[in-house]
Amino acid sequence: MKNNNYVLLAVFTLFLGGCASFTVQPNYFQSVGETDNGTALKAYVGDILYTKYDYESRDFVRLTFENGCGMGCTLVATDTMFLASQVNGKYGACGTAQTRAGMMGIMQQINLCVVDEDRDEVFEAWSSSTASGKLKNSVPYQFQTADSVRGKKKELIYQGKQDDTLRFRYREYINDIVRPAFDQTVEYNIDTDKVVTFRGMKILVEYADNQEIAYRIVSGTIEL
């Protein structure tokens, strides 16, 4: 694959409720790529022999911690999901947590962000719309990539050979959902012509059987 670039997208500014406001910019990472053109390639039955994609994902982390927030208040997060964000220009993550206050331990849900001030994979501070402070115990973390993405992907899958006929499966995705109208099987006879043309893309078949295919993309691309 090539051009697998990740870029930070600051999409909007979120104001969390309260007497004061602070800026939160969600961190989205963009992944763009396409199977190499002109390179000798091989795929087995069931493998993707061509793909092109452009999508965004947002990382997340699950955190558990307790921390004082002043005047008998305690911040509580228990296996809580926090989404990658920039908080007042600093690297962090935001989600919901609870505050526990008073002798009765009254709980209330709030919007809360944690901040990694020096990008060392440890959260050292917290911030909300009304207050902020240092975490009494720093919280190590490691982001995970979200299962759901937004964007487009197209792929061509090798499904084997029978006599002189090659079979492929073509799929299109919007976000992470297959588009049923664009999930189809296509067949090509290569008895006389070893070049398969699909949606303007030309694939030279150098060898193929019911187990694998050796090929190269000689021209064209599939438009997203």
Image (spheres, rainbow, N blue to C red):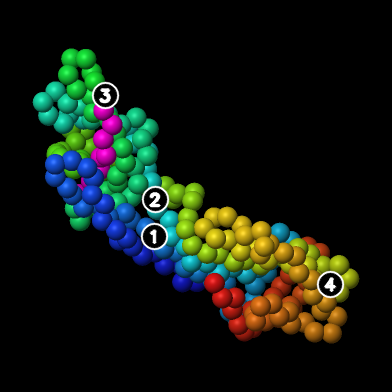
Q: Which mark is residue 59?
A: 2
Snapshot quadrant of residue 65: top left
Q: Amino acid at mark 1?
A: Phe
| Label whose residue precedes the other's in the sequence (1 or 2) | 1
Looking at the rendered image, the disc whose residue lies closer to the viewer, 1 or 3, is 3
Q: Residue drawn at (27%, 39%), measured in percent from left and top?
A: 111
Residue 107: numbered disc: 3
**Label 1, residues with CA under 10 Å away: few <14, some 14-19, many ≥20:** some
Disc number lying in front (3 or 4): 3
Determine the CA span between mark 3 and mark 4. Answer: 66 Å
Q: Which mark is residue 29?
A: 1
Q: Residues within 10 Å of mark 2 (few under 14, many from 20)?
A: some
100 lies left or right of 156 = left
Which residue is at a point 14% across and 45% down the rendered structure image? 20
Residue 112: within the magenta? Answer: yes
Whole-number angstrom distance, CA of label 1 to CA of label 4: 41 Å
Q: Amino acid at mark 3?
A: Met
Q: CA distance from mark 4 to mark 2?
A: 43 Å
Which three-letter amino acid code belongs to the residue tagged 4? Thr
Indicate the secondary structure of the residue bearing disc 2. strand
Residue 76 position in % (x across, y down): 27, 29
